[in-house]
Amino acid sequence: MFHLASLICSGCEDGETNQFYDNLEKRQCYCSCQHSLCTQCFNKYKNCPICAKPLVRTENYAARQIYEQFKENPMIVFNKWWCSIQNTDAPEMCPSCHVDRRKFHWCIECEMKLENSEAKFRRARIFPRTDLQKQLCKISGVRFGFAIFASRVICSDCVLQDHDGHHIVSVKNLYAAMMNDKSITGSATQVATQFLWSEIAERSGKCLLRTMRLKRACLKLFWTARAPSYNIFSVDQSKFFEPLVQMSDDYIDRVRKNVEHQFVCANSPWKNCNCTQIMRKMQELALKNQIEKRYVEIVSELELQEITECPLKMERVQDLLDKSNKMSRMQLHKLYTVFCWNYYRTDTYELFNETDRKPLICSQCKVSTCFECYNRLYNECGFCECSIMAVFLKYKDDVEARTNHEALELLKFYKENCIEVLEEWWASDAFQLGFCLSCSSYSEDLEICVYCELVLRRSVLRTDAESPDNFKKGMKIRFNYKWLGGLPLRWQCSDCVDRLFKEDQGAWKQGCNHFLQRRSPIKITKEYAEHNCKATVIRLKEIKNYGFALKSATFRLVFKILRAGIEEKGHFRNGISQTYWLLYSRIQYFLRNSLNGRKSVEMEELKVNISRLIGELKAHSYRNE
């Protein structure tokens, strides 16, 4: 594992997060003491942080050639590290002379002379030099990280050349202490895997599916090779994939060969590759979860096959493209994104604007909250209670940088086409209105936690159970029309990031994603305990009159946009005002009765009458223009 020392700058360990060399600000510099530092650390230090000798810049062609070889094929780094873990007698590269050797040593005498001694002796410094050899058996471990420790390891030839007559100890005798030292094993694992991961980021080409497949294969290696003390698993990259399990040695070897082949093909141009453009289009329409799941299916089916073209076939995503084309006209599913759902005390939600209610994106959960609510909530996000925003809101430039301009542009579009939005909403199906505020994505699989909902005094659900604890599956659940305006805050989609359990091997697990802090007017019963939630999740589709419930939940949103658009044009006069309020009352009456299951000739006539009133509203608007 000592070859890993040639990839990282040991001087960057103190306070720097990126330790790997690059070809820009952190170019590799070789010193006369045979150690290497990045250009930033070379200019910062006077003495080498590894051996404390004065820094004199030189050139090491052998070391540079090895480093360039690692950069060209990153899997060499991982394979050498993997072999060294599996077989401690395997040849390793000496960090000093950069030649593969089998026997390595540690100079205790030189180590004792350094202020930041790596050897961890029990009162070793008080013993005279003659007794030093007797104390070697008392070495219980090493100090600091893996980088400096690996840089000070020397082979037998380097011992004869630079440490003749010194007290040395075989590294093999230290392996027991090293393997018990979680900082050493964890750091080595981190260096080997993060270097591979950083190379993937640099080589991410135009084919998104190829990059996803390469990352997934690498995650399989990381999961198997991870140290017990270091959680190397990337949460974001595991979304929608099946949980990882322990793999056999034979399968790991096949994965390593496959990853090496993918790295070789990483930058090769592939014709007819549209997967990146399709993903970008879907993300703009807030359909990222749907397209990501479809891409995951394609990557999972490929497994370890060697491919020579983009694996995306248009028939696999044609249904999503057709749906996106249908939804892109008015983008009704994104209605929720132009409202602040933390509007303080006066109402549950309010439209954003470009003045006091400017939408600001939270740096943690990425959900927008208006500027006024941030000030009233002491600069804390009402969704995740993150206080980081307090740092960014001190200056006007920071506020502008955090402003959600996409939401403002969408709001402008809604206002300009406010009557068309109403018309489209009235004729729309329920599937066009599903949207999850937690992950900012369209969803057809909306869920709600029955247990959490029934303990709220303003519950959007009704049931025959006397209390949440008495609720059982199979009981009739109905929507409570009175409080359906807050339903978008309470539902969750089946793909919410917040329910990915890190400790559960990256498995996606159904659970409660209830946000109780989003609405200040909501009061919770005393019996409610957040951590004792039963997580009784039910799909909204399974509740009767689901379509009317979604219409009722978005009813006031649409009319707020309608009024704002009409007032902005200066048309909210007698004729339009009367039609507006007549529409409002009749749609409200229709939705309330339809949600309660009322079906009659009166409801059908009312539905036709509402469509006629929308036509009149549109005619009034055209005459005033």
Image: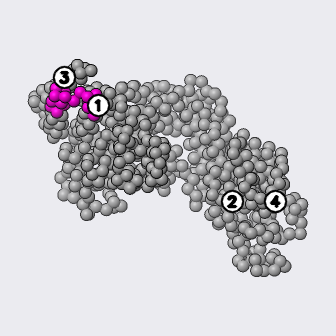
The residue shown at (56%, 26%) is 273
Q: Is residue 568 above or below residue 361?
A: above
Question: Mark 3 or mark 4, which is nearer the start of the sequence?
Answer: 4
Residue 254 point in image, percent of width and height? 64, 43
Residue 6 is a magenta residue: no
SS class, disc 1: helix
Disc 4 marks which residue? 54
User: How far apart are the two marked residues, 1 and 2, measured between alpha carbons?
Assistant: 64 Å
Question: Mark 1 or mark 3, which is nearer the start of the sequence?
Answer: 1
Q: Taking 403 as reference, is 332 left or right?
A: left
SS class, disc 3: helix
User: How far apart are the two marked residues, 4 and 2, measured between alpha carbons?
Assistant: 22 Å
Q: Which residues are magenta?
A: 564-583
Q: Taking 474 as reference, is 353 left or right?
A: right
Q: Residue furthest top?
A: 623
Are discs 4 and 1 less than 8 Å apart at CB?
Answer: no
Q: Is residue 51 above or below residue 605?
A: below
**Residue type indicated by callout 1:** Glu
Q: Which mark is residue 146?
A: 2
SS class, disc 4: loop
Q: Which mark is residue 616?
A: 3
Disc 1 marks which residue? 568
